[in-house]
Image: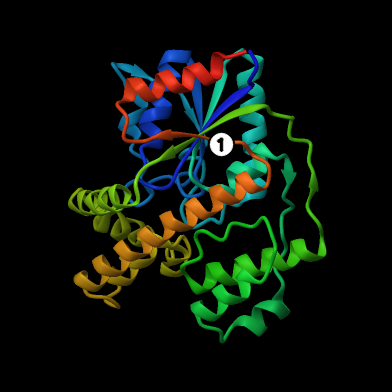
């Protein structure tokens, strides 16, 4: 075949996982996740794992790099590249087609472009200099760096400081090619209208809260996971943890979280457009099409000479 892998990307709530699972059934493939938070066990509703989507017409689709580490740890792109490389090589050795699926732009791009991301050490002096900055000030500082580091999910002070720390490191230690195998991937982007995306995000947030997302956070805290560690993960875990701690009312939590997820999806799309400018060809598929039509378009691209 012309391609070694198929990549399915798109913003949150665009329908990536169902599309990847149905495609995997048709092509007898296995899925590799590219999501920076779905690596954590027992963080299910807040990360939107939707594991039921991996079962299509009674067939369980094998998936990888989900539920591979404990909550409270700080998994990073350096570890992701190593884990991806091992899974990818295993699938190729077994003659299985990999379908890479996710919305974490840094993880996707580091694999597709073959960058080596080193394990970045802490910089105590820089952290001290940034310690009194607000999230808005930190976000502004981060925007001044021309770096591959993920800027799409920095909605907590601690996460923003770490992002600046990483960006500063790579400004002084240029990113170079890695031992990651050269991969010729067909890259599919799911394109859905902005208003539909916003409606899906709002509907999904309400559904997950109804399903017990607050209790999920309470359970994680009861395990002894420090609140600041959960807040570090951003988005749902930031706002739900602050609600459980009594720092926000339910209405404040809901409203602020809904806005944050909408902003996150917008930043994801900005990253994907940047990937195109940096040389990755993305074939955009209309996310409103019926599943069979989307699959047909992807298969035509995959099988063409």
Residue 176 vs residue 14, the one in the foreground: 14
Residue ID at (65%, 37%): 112
Residue extending farthest bottom: 132
* Labels in figure, total: 1
Residue extending farthest left: 210
The quadrant of the image that shows the N terminus is top right
Please state the horizontal and vertical placement of residue 113, each as a whole percent of the image: 70, 40
Residue 54 vs residue 231, the one in the foreground: 54
Left or right, 277 with reference to 218: right
Q: Quadrant of residue 61?
A: top left
The quadrant of the image that shows the C terminus is top right
Left or right, 144 with reference to 34: right
Mark 1 nearby-residue class (10 Å; few <14, some 14–19, many ≥20): some
Left or right, 19 with reference to 137: left
Please state the horizontal and vertical placement of residue 39, each as a whole percent of the image: 49, 44
Residue ID at (55%, 13%): 303
Residue ID at (72%, 80%): 125
Task: Judge whether 249 appears above or below 267 on screen.
Answer: below
Residue ID at (47%, 70%): 156
Q: Quadrant of residue 22?
A: top left
Would you name the residue on which mark 1 appears?
A: 282
Please state the horizontal and vertical placement of residue 300, each as a whole percent of the image: 49, 17
State whether residue 145 appears in this view: yes
Q: Quadrant of residue 26?
A: top left
Task: Judge whether 256 appears above or below 3 on screen.
Answer: below
């Amino acid at each position: 075949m012309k391609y070694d892998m198929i990549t399915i990307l798109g913003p949150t709530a665009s329908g990536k996982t169902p599309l990847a699972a149905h495609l995997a059934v048709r092509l007898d493939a296995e899925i590799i996740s590219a999501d920076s938070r779905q690596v954590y066990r027992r963080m299910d509703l807040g990360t939107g794992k939707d594991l039921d989507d991996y079962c299509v017409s009674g067939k369980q689709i094998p998936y990888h790099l989900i539920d591979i580490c404990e909550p409270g740890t700080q998994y990073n792109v350096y570890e992701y590249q190593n884990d991806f490389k091992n899974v990818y090589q295993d699938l190729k050795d077994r003659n299985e087609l990999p379908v890479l699926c996710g919305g974490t732009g840094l993880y996707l791009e580091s694999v597709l472009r073959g960058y080596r991301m080193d394990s970045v050490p802490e910089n105590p002096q820089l952290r001290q200099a940034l310690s009194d900055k607000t999230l808005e000030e930190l976000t502004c500082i981060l925007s001044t760096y021309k770096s591959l580091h993920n800027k799409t999910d920095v909605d907590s002070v601690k996460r923003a400081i770490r992002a600046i720390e990483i960006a500063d490191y790579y400004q002084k230690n240029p990113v170079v090619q890695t031992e990651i195998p050269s991969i010729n991937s067909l890259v599919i982007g799911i394109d859905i209208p902005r208003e539909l995306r916003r409606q899906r995000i709002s509907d999904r947030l309400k559904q997950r809260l109804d399903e017990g997302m607050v209790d999920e956070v309470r359970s994680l805290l009861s395990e002894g996971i420090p609140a600041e560690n959960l807040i570090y993960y951003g988005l749902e875990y930031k706002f739900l943890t602050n609600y459980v701690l009594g720092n926000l009312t339910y209405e404040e939590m809901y409203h602020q979280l809904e806005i944050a997820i909408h902003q996150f999806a917008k930043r994801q799309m900005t990253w994907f457009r940047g990937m195109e400018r940096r040389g990755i060809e993305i074939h955009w598929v209309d996310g409103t099409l019926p599943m069979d039509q989307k699959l047909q378009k992807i298969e035509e691209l995959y099988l063409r000479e």
